[in-house]
Image (cartoon, grey):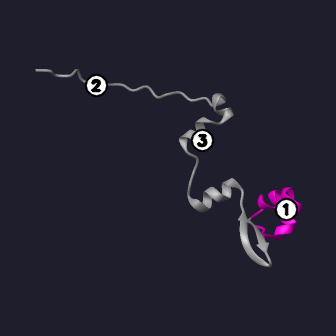
C-alpha cells in the first residue's frame, strides 16, 4: 500500500492525481505541513468503517436488473388458518 502526501495547494491543483493515488493507498492532505485530511476510495472507507453496502444501495445499482437470481422454492405449510372460535 502506497501512502501519498499532498499539500492543500497540490490537492486543489491536481484532484485527479489525488484520486489516482487513492487507488494505491491513502492520500494525506496537509495544511501548513500538518496532516488535515485523508482521501480514500469508497472501498477502503467501507473496510475502515466496517460498513458494507446497504440493501438500498445494492437495489439502486443500474446493473442490478442484469443480476440473475432465482428464489428458492419452499415446501411445506407456512401459514395456518386463523381460529376465530
Residue ID at (87%, 67%): 10
Measured in 3D between alpha carbons, the distance from the residue under mark 2 to the one under mark 3, in whole angstroms, is 32 Å
Report the magenta residues as a range: 1-25
Helix or strand or loop: what does disc 3 sit on? helix
Q: Considering only order in the chain, which callout, 3 or 2, is on the residue closer to the N terminus?
A: 3
Residue ID at (67%, 54%): 43
Residue ID at (53%, 27%): 70
- For disc 1, the marked residue is 12
Left or right: 38, with 49 as reference point: right
Is there a contact, CB below 8 Å, between mark 1 and mark 3? no
- For disc 3, the marked residue is 57
* In magenta segment, residue 68: no
Measured in 3D between alpha carbons, the distance from the residue under mark 2 to the one under mark 1, in whole angstroms, is 61 Å
Disc 3: CA contacts within 10 A as few (<14), some (14-19) or many (>=20): few
Measured in 3D between alpha carbons, the distance from the residue under mark 1 to the one under mark 3, in whole angstroms, is 30 Å
Q: Considering only order in the chain, which callout, 1 or 2, is on the residue closer to the N terminus?
A: 1
Q: Considering only order in the chain, which callout, 3 or 1, is on the residue closer to the N terminus?
A: 1
Q: Position of residue 21 (x, y in %)?
A: 81, 61
Q: Quadrant of the C terminus?
A: top left
- Looking at the image, residue 11 lies above or below residue 69: below
Which dot, 2 or 1, sits closer to the camera?
1
Q: Residue furthest bottom?
A: 33
Q: Position of residue 36 (x, y in %)?
A: 72, 72
Amino acid at each position: 500500500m502506497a501512502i501519498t502526501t499532498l499539500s492543500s495547494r497540490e490537492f486543489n491543483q491536481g484532484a485527479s492525481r489525488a484520486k489516482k493515488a487513492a487507488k494505491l493507498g491513502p492520500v494525506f492532505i496537509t495544511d501548513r505541513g500538518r496532516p488535515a485530511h485523508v482521501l480514500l476510495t469508497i472501498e477502503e472507507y467501507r473496510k475502515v468503517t466496517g460498513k458494507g453496502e446497504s440493501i438500498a444501495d445494492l437495489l439502486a445499482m443500474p446493473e442490478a436488473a442484469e443480476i440473475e437470481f432465482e428464489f428458492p422454492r419452499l415446501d411445506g405449510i407456512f401459514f395456518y388458518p386463523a381460529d376465530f372460535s
